[in-house]
Image (cartoon, coloured by chain):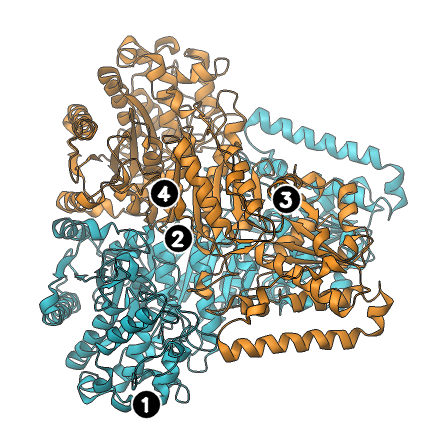
Chain colours: A orange, B cyan
Amino acid sequence: MIFLKDNVLLERDLRLEDVKPRLLGHWGTCPGIILIWSHLNLLIRESSVDMLFVVGPGHGAPAALACLWLEGSLERFYPDKYPANKEGLHNLITKFSVPGGFPSHINPETPGCIHEGGELGYALSVSFGAVMDNPDLIVACVVGDGEAETGPTAAAWHSIKYLDPAESGAVIPILHVNGFKISERTIFGCMDNKELVLLFSGYGYQVCIVENLESIDAELYSALFWALGEIKRIQNGAREGNPITKPRWPMIILRSPKGWTGPRTVDNQIIEGSFHAHQVPVAKANKDEEHLRILQEWLKSYEVQELLANGKPSQDLLDILPEDTKRLGQLKTAYDCYRGLDLPDWNPHAVKKFEQASSMQQSGKFLDSVAKKNMHTFRIFSPDELESNKLSAVLDHSGRNFQWDQYSRAQGGRVIEILSEHCCQGFLQGYTLTGRTAIFPSYESFLGIIHTMMIQYAKFSKIGRKLSWRGDLSSINYIETSTWARQEHNGFSHQNPSFIGAVLNLKADTARVYLPPDANCFLSTVHHCLKSKNYVNLMIGSKQPTPVYLSAEDAMEHCKKGISIWKFASTYSGEDPDVILVGIGVEVTFEVIKAAELLAKLAPELRVRVINVTDLLVLPDESHHPHALKPKDFEEIFTLDKPVCFNYHSYATELQGLLFGRPALHRMTVEGYKEEGSTTTPFDMMLVNGVSRFHVASRALKASASQNDAVQDQLSALLSKVDEDMAKVQDYIKENGKDPEDIYKLDFMGAKA
Amino acid sequence: MIFLKDNVLLERDLRLEDVKPRLLGHWGTCPGIILIWSHLNLLIRESSVDMLFVVGPGHGAPAALACLWLEGSLERFYPDKYPANKEGLHNLITKFSVPGGFPSHINPETPGCIHEGGELGYALSVSFGAVMDNPDLIVACVVGDGEAETGPTAAAWHSIKYLDPAESGAVIPILHVNGFKISERTIFGCMDNKELVLLFSGYGYQVCIVENLESIDAELYSALFWALGEIKRIQNGAREGNPITKPRWPMIILRSPKGWTGPRTVDNQIIEGSFHAHQVPVAKANKDEEHLRILQEWLKSYEVQELLANGKPSQDLLDILPEDTKRLGQLKTAYDCYRGLDLPDWNPHAVKKFEQASSMQQSGKFLDSVAKKNMHTFRIFSPDELESNKLSAVLDHSGRNFQWDQYSRAQGGRVIEILSEHCCQGFLQGYTLTGRTAIFPSYESFLGIIHTMMIQYAKFSKIGRKLSWRGDLSSINYIETSTWARQEHNGFSHQNPSFIGAVLNLKADTARVYLPPDANCFLSTVHHCLKSKNYVNLMIGSKQPTPVYLSAEDAMEHCKKGISIWKFASTYSGEDPDVILVGIGVEVTFEVIKAAELLAKLAPELRVRVINVTDLLVLPDESHHPHALKPKDFEEIFTLDKPVCFNYHSYATELQGLLFGRPALHRMTVEGYKEEGSTTTPFDMMLVNGVSRFHVASRALKASASQNDAVQDQLSALLSKVDEDMAKVQDYIKENGKDPEDIYKLDFMGAKA
């Protein structure tokens, strides 16, 4: 696949023109993957288990594709392009890694795949996520010794401690040690067997090492059957009511040379068993006769003409395959098993208008009701922040699923709390990709830890949705709380709203960002997100009690539109405004409302319109997002020429970028979090980041002076008044170490004007 | 510190009004940190080692601050505020975690600290970075059992394998197992001693467990001296030419109850030894008399009036301290030891104008010369991508520093390649924070893995720079290559330019983003960055040979300005333009130049100005960045009204956000990477993302029609011509699986017009 563009069965001697002009692909990891793949199909055949194969070394695509073609799975999903005959084989090989063919990394176009084969480190946690609540599923997961150096993999070995053998399936981890990364030896390749056995025994595994190249088939066969036996033993115990404490799950370490069976040397350089085997071992096969000769000799060594006579796999090869639907490329769990949620109504948890409520506490109650109705299809993954994020009502009818020692054998718990965002995200992905629904609540500042994983997932989802044979999936759902705007116990290190930007960079048909302004809107949003499909949903809210502005019904309406003029907070009901104030995010919206109150007192003639945006993606230009406001609607809300002051939860430039293309940007100002703050009072955080009511009011006065004569006339006096008020509050905080109590009182003065 | 706002020495019975109105802070981890701190000072006193203490559980600030006050380090750096007397103690306690006092997490204001105590997972790798090339330094590093669950920590245990005992110092890792996170048991707390010893022996350590609470002082004392002895044994061997293969470095596991010595129970809830001890154990001490009583009893148990009579630490306490400058808070290595680089000239590696060169190959040669001149103050950390990124010339006079088995005992190598971006970043931070300079080259797509670490570092740097007693530091330097624009072996999963956005969110006095258009500009930029201080420098370039547009001298000038009109690529020398084309990034700039060529042929009357931006931060509004163009300069380059077509390397919204505030945005269009692509040809990547010459030319024609009558008259014919040309290339790629050869030829047609 890396080399040939013709003569794929070597029916005549290779010529330079049989070789592709650009030699792209990764050879080194392939032999190991093919070896494992073949044995797994045999295992399935002999034991009838339901099995998926997650391949960590994703650039081993040629191995996966070869096996998939051999087992007929490519024909199943691509009958025209890759049938199990000479033409299909020709296409597979010649189109590999060229435009229109399979790419050089495993991706959703690869049947059986539930893991984007790009960024390394996540194969193991994704595998564990897939088997949760799938009691009959076994995922074999190969982890390369390069990938094994990553932190996310190093943490994910602990995942067995979160696996209930009664309710969930199992993973057979296979650490493939071939000794080399791209150009350097690997850590695990330099560890001897004693070290490896110690390490993985410490993690809690029973280790079986497969390394004798002479008898590798027998060894691997035995190892896999042993692993399956151990899994059954652990599962049977748990399922029969006699769970084993600290069950020692099996794992396999496979040692084989990098690029095994490839050329020994090329140009006097060792290839097989060295890092030179990583990508293209015979680099000049398209222009150097000697290289071409080496290539031919190498390829001939596989006896393709016997094994694939006339492009048909020989009976020997077919004999080890399980029945169609059980082959590694064809288990429905990998591609079409969306189960959806039976979603309860959120209205019982709605809060009365103008009361105070924590969005998180109310959502916790709702999520508890979701968990109760969906005991095997819904999970919450959290990095030990559930209590802190005030979502603990989800534990009312469920528990934490931690399985290790005798004190922690919680059963059936819907919540997993491991202090590894990477594991949480990997579990979430595996769980979602196999048809279920999950939610990942996090401190706002630390969700960025898995920003690139989320992007990898979104890439998988984007390609997957284009394939007719892949079914829908639940969205992946994030809740961010404990935001920079309410720091309490924490400080500067806990301030980082950048995950919003990461989601905004995704394709428009995937990215969804919500900043519901109150508990009712948050409930409506969570409900909507859990029901939605194929998105990346990010919801941001407060865990502290904050005012509820909208009734349940109005909240639903507001969330549906994504943006509304809030007449109750505006002066003159927001009609014919001199200036428009926009809040996006809980605390900054509160400041906008307070700014409107302040302005109503200071300059009662000023016509102030207050807007809240709950769905961030109504703002960009129509061509950029399906939720975007049509020009007419944008004009109705923002006018075409009045000054607009945005008070935004995240970084200003982010919102500025979104607004680009909207009319008359010069009338708009945007303020947001600007990397200021420490452990301080909530209101001080508004002050130091320039998003307080005083800042908004000042901006509004300056901007609207040209619109309103009264303001124009006394502008400097008004501004001084605002500054004075602000200084008073600043002094109070400095003296008392807390915010003035009345700062959180809401008069809705605006509405009265 | 968490509780009192008065009566800090308990000179009378506590009253409710002695207690702070908001009780903020984390108690649970503190007793362990104080215990270790005290023993470390004793160890230093008795052995005269140079030692730093890196505290993973950063929310243990009260423990660190208490020790620092006791040892006089707070007085040293804050003589007015925190003297070692009653007043200083009063300030320390009453101001803790309130505005103006120390925050509740360890941060740069904490003397002796080299690690932001926020996001968990990085203490260990930072510690190892600090001891590299510091042969006499020992860093004691406490890792909490919460932090130990993170991936980055799990990977960092392997760091000993990259530590040369001859040239570097050592780390004493202390895993502090107290059993609980915020609200859940920890993984390590549930592992028994056998499991822990197996695990860490597997990593390569000798393990000593300290757990007997009755004799904890004796045990910890012995353990630390044992660890020091083992370190000396390993170091002496290596330094005397008899290095030990696979030296088993010492580590300590300390088991002690969470919140040890705190209240046993409050309101019938267990506190000591449970997760309830995590933050504020007596939550209502400011309003409940019973809670107040518990608090008083608890605080009295420490005999403060004897140990701190009249606010002076007793002689017993002072007797265990080492000399001033060796105390944990005062070793200069932690706060003021910038050593800078002896930087060679980059001109010997410059390339002749209009030749082709790889920015990375040339930079590799320059970095080699830097390494040669700075054998103990410069390092390169890379996740096994040095060869692939074509920077391997740095290995010409150096090697990879990998230390484990007998085949890998490279000595003095300036390069560390571990396939863990988290470790690379941690090493980089520790190395830089102790006065040296490092660079982290990476695939563009995977640098985002450490995006939040970089932000934590920038937060540390921001606060640190405000402190007069902290000296300058080198910048942290990133090179991104193997960008989305040249995918070669990889595909969609390897496309992610989002790290630019992460840097742009930093404070303006820190953020620096460069996209040098050719090898000479890249050399000039690397040179500049290595010389700079206190920034986060991000440099993005190509590893493939690309045209060199500027002589060394011109490159220097261009980089100094950050932006220039490229007359040679413009028509009419770029004067009085009808339309302005802007390239930001290597490949997209090439497309801009080719678009200008195309336009010169199609519409020779059209006056096209070509601009390159190499310093991204010249673009935002003047008030937003020190590099920003002044309005007059902006106008000179961009005019006030001519259409401007930006062709940008990263996401369009990012650049749009930066441009906000510049005049007449409606005339500007921005295109950039838009999450499209697979394993395909380089030019196809330009096509599918809409940034090819054809796209630029079309945009330019449409935008300039109103400026130029000739274009206006034949607009649709011109656009069809461009579309035809594009279709031809698309067809060629589809048919041949490669780009047409002439697509990379540069005629500088524009210059001829």
Q: Residue at x 16, y 65 (%)?
A: B238
Q: Residues within 10 Å of mark 4 (few under 14, many from 20)?
A: few
Subunit of label 2: B
Foreground of the two, A713 or A354? A354
Q: How crowded is mark 3: few (under 14 residues within 10 Å), some or many (20 or more)?
A: many
For this view, does A686 lie left or right of residue A173?
A: right
Eyeballing the image, is B724 above or below A599?
Answer: above
Subunit of label 3: A
Q: Which residue is disc 2 drawn over?
A: B392
- Residue A649, given in percent of the width and then of the height, sits at 58, 56
The quadrant where residue A100 appears: top right
Report if the CB atoms under discs 1 and 4 are less than 8 Å apart. Answer: no
Amino acid type, residue under disc 1 in the picture: Asn
Amino acid type, residue under disc 4 in the picture: Asp
Q: How crowded is mark 1: few (under 14 residues within 10 Å), some or many (20 or more)?
A: some
Subunit of label 4: A
> Are dots 4 and 3 on a single chain?
yes
- Residue A35, given in percent of the width and then of the height, sits at 26, 26
Give the spatial CA distance, label 2 vs label 1: 57 Å
- Label placed on residue A719: none
Eyeballing the image, is A158 above or below A474?
Answer: below
Subunit of label 1: B
Q: Which residue is disc 4 drawn over?
A: A396
Report if the CB atoms under discs 2 and 4 are less than 8 Å apart. Answer: no
- Residue B493, given in percent of the width and then of the height, sits at 47, 39
Q: Which residue is disc 1 drawn over?
A: B85
Is residue B169 among what the camera can see? no
> Are dots 1 and 4 on a single chain?
no
Is residue B326 among what the camera can see? yes
Which corner quadrant holds the C terminus of chain A?
bottom right
- Name the element at disc 2: helix
